[in-house]
Amino acid sequence: MRRHEYFGPVALPAMHSLATRTFPMTGYRHVGDLTWNWCLSLDRADECPTAVWSHGDETLAWGWLELPDNLMLQVDPSRPELADEVLAWAERTAGGTLSVEVAETEPHLVSVLERRGYTLPRSRSRSRTRPSGGTPVVDGPFMACLGRPLTGLPAIPRLPDGYTIRAQQSHADVAGRAAAHRAAFGSTRVTTERHARMREIWPYRAEFDLVVVSPEGAVAAYCQGWYDEANGIGTFEPVGAHPDHRRLGLARAVCIAVLHAFADAGGHRAVVCSRGDADYPVPKRLYESMGFAEYTRTRTYVGRPRRQAL
């Protein structure tokens, strides 16, 4: 067994290999999600330490810190003991309280977190009973994981006059797509340069990264699709509409177009993660209108590093 540590997600192909092998079992951490997060971490390597555990050529676990306190991790369900090693590394590296989001389909991670004293924190959101019953816990913002088969797809809706759906064709399209994301989410992290670099990283394919272009030639909405060819599963990450072009059905139309692109590539299933709590319900309703249904959800555990024995 070997552990390699890095500044930034340098070993992204190794992380991808575990995600490809594990996703059919857990439905969480799609290869496209990892590449999207890689894009967001560009030029911030010192804020994103990572570690990868492997045996021979096989990746068995990885941890990815977003300092100061957020940990993403994935562990092969057949090697649950490695979850302890990933958490120990993250606790030692971060040195403070950690926040760890896992899916309910990852019981091998949940059991280790709870054994190490991680808990579900209190929040301002509504109370909810644990899935197994018992004492209600106060539930914070969480992600719902939604899926649907790539059969019986709805037809791509007709767009308002002058709007078209297509793949990005030029540097101006790339810049427009990045600008539309910044406007949609009020974020500055997706620059033209970062989006252009992301387009060079596996598993990016231009036919799944579609935009809606307005009559004036501006990017009005977009759906970034990622396709895991080994498993035949596509995902959306991210989806958005420019505030000047909302309430026209553009986001729904471009998402359905990407679903058809997944099906044309031979895919059999599509998934998407969306906020599932009542504080931010609109995206989930959008996906449900396209036939997606929830199959699992996330929970965020919080814990402090264990005291080391003297």
Image (tube, grey):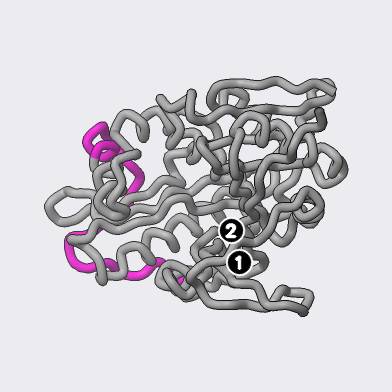
Q: Position of residue 254 (x, y in %)?
A: 38, 59
> Which image quadrant: the N terminus?
top right
In this orientation, which residue lies closer to the viewer: 51 or 78? Answer: 51
Q: Residue at x 49, y 58 (%)?
A: 260
Q: Position of residue 227 (x, y in %)?
A: 56, 45
Q: Position of residue 81 (x, y in %)?
A: 86, 40
Determine the CA span between mark 2 and mark 1: 6 Å
Q: Is residue 301 magenta?
A: no
Kindly check if marks 2 and 1 are in contact, taking CB atoms under 8 A apart as contact.
yes
In this orientation, which residue lies closer to the viewer: 11 or 166? Answer: 11
Q: Residue at x 60, y 21 (%)?
A: 6
Q: Amino acid at mark 1?
A: Arg
Q: Quadrant of residue 220?
A: bottom left
Q: Earlier in the sequence, mark 2 or mark 1?
A: 1
The residue singled out by tag 1 in the image is 148
For label 2, the SS is strand
- The circle drawn on residue 215 is none
In this orientation, which residue lies closer to the viewer: 35 or 121? Answer: 121
- The circle drawn on residue 270 is 2
Q: Residue at x 26, y 40 (%)?
A: 173
Q: Residue at x 44, y 44 (%)?
A: 207
In this orientation, which residue lies closer to the viewer: 265 or 206? Answer: 206
For label 1, the SS is strand
Q: Does 93 sit above or below residue 33?
A: above
Q: Position of residue 301 (x, y in %)?
A: 65, 55
Q: Is residue 159 magenta?
A: yes
Q: Magenta region: which residues?
A: 154-175
Q: Residue furthest left?
A: 216
